[in-house]
Image: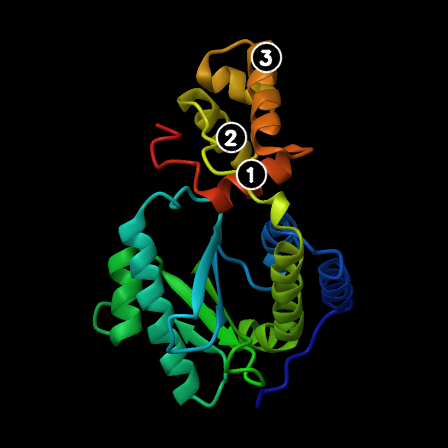
């Protein structure tokens, strides 16, 4: 970046923790938790879109990582794909520098799309050293404030870790296809409600209060979810349900 960005000792320590914790990410649920945890201190966001493959080809794929329950909205996911491609185009025209966006109906193609979709402020950046088959592109949506040069600086600094962590995760999934969800596995409506509340950080007692169930009933639902998804804990269950798009938009209503 052209402008010098200074970090406090605390920020340096947090940055090192974020980088070190990225080395522990091998699975999708770990990537989700890392993006929702350590990464938030430098690139706060509600929705992270990761793109990989080769730009401008059918092989370029976008995947959404979010606490928000948007995975069953196919139309919105298609809109996100179009939005990301527009951001890729602007990023490439800018020479591979981080792109900062704010929703504005009159602020150009990307800004208008952000406004229409309700995604607010956004930052987009990719690994400019790899733009073909192994391209990596990252879009941070619904940032709590308009991104600035500090956010752009952190996107530059953390890009190698975002990229390597993404491809480590993809490789791990390729090497262990048995960890994916078996075809035909479905959650009941009540189980979908429970996993949706787990995703939102609720404890069993809070879920029981929200759904007017006993804590024991909630515990049984959680155990059934873990068994169906073939995972060991709640974090893994959320990540696998998100990937398989088992959490519908009506889960919390």
- Separation of marks 3 and 2 at Cα, in angstroms: 15 Å
Relative vertical location of residue 170 with respect to residue 126 in this rendering, above or below = above
Give the mark nearest the N terminus, 1 or 3: 3
The residue carrying pointer 1 sits among few (fewer than 14), some (14 to 19) or many (20 or more) residues within 10 Å by Cα, namely: many
Relative vertical location of residue 86 with respect to residue 32 in this rendering, above or below = below
The residue carrying pointer 3 sits among few (fewer than 14), some (14 to 19) or many (20 or more) residues within 10 Å by Cα, namely: some
Give the mark nearest the N terminus, 2 or 1: 2
- Using the image as rendered, state which of residue 107 and residue 90 is in the foreground: 90
Disc 2 is placed on an element classified as helix
- Considering every residue shown, the one lying at the far left of the view is 106
**x and y percentages locating residue 69 in the rendered image:** 41, 41
Residue topped by disc 1: 238
Give the quarter of the image for residue 249: top left
What's the residue at 51%, 30% (across, down)?
A: 195
**x and y percentages locating residue 59 in the rendered image:** 43, 70
- Separation of marks 1 and 3 at Cα, in angstroms: 19 Å
- Using the image as rendered, state which of residue 30 and residue 197 is in the foreground: 30
Residue 226 appearing in the image: yes
Which quadrant is home to the C terminus?
Answer: top left
Disc 3 is placed on an element classified as helix
- Separation of marks 2 and 1 at Cα, in angstroms: 7 Å
- Using the image as rendered, state which of residue 78 and residue 94 is in the foreground: 78
Q: Which of labels 3 and 2 is toward the front?
A: 2
What's the residue at 61%, 73% (across, down)?
A: 159
CB under 8 Å between callouts 2 and 1?
yes
Residue topped by disc 2: 195
What's the residue at 34%, 55% (across, down)?
A: 77
Residue 143 appearing in the image: no
Residue topped by disc 3: 215
CB under 8 Å between callouts 1 and 3?
no
What's the residue at 39%, 30% (across, down)?
A: 251
């Amino acid at each position: 970046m052209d402008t010098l960005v200074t970090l406090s000792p605390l920020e340096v320590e947090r940055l090192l923790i974020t980088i070190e914790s990225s080395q522990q990410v091998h699975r999708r649920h770990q990537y989700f938790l890392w993006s929702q945890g350590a990464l938030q201190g430098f690139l706060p966001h509600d929705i992270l879109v990761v793109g990989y493959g080769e730009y401008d080809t059918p092989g370029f794929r976008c995947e959404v990582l979010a606490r928000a329950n948007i995975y069953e909205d196919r139309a919105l996911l298609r809109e996100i794909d179009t939005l990301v491609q527009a951001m890729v185009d602007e990023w490439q025209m800018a020479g591979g520098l981080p792109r900062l966006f704010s929703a504005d109906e009159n602020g150009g193609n990307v800004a208008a799309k952000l406004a229409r979709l309700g995604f607010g402020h956004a930052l987009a950046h990719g690994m400019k050293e790899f733009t073909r088959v192994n391209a990596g592109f990252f879009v941070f949506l619904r940032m709590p404030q308009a991104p600035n040069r500090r956010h752009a600086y952190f996107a530059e600094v953390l890009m190698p870790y975002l990229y390597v962590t993404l491809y480590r995760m993809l490789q791990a999934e390729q090497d262990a296809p048995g960890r994916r969800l078996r075809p035909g596995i479905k959650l009941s409506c009540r189980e979908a409600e429970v996993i949706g509340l787990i995703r939102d950080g609720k404890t069993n007692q809070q879920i029981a209060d929200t759904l007017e169930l006993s804590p024991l009933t909630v515990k049984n639902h959680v155990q059934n979810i873990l068994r169906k998804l073939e995972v060991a804990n709640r974090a893994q269950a959320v990540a696998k349900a998100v990937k398989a798009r088992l959490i519908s938009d009506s889960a919390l209503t």
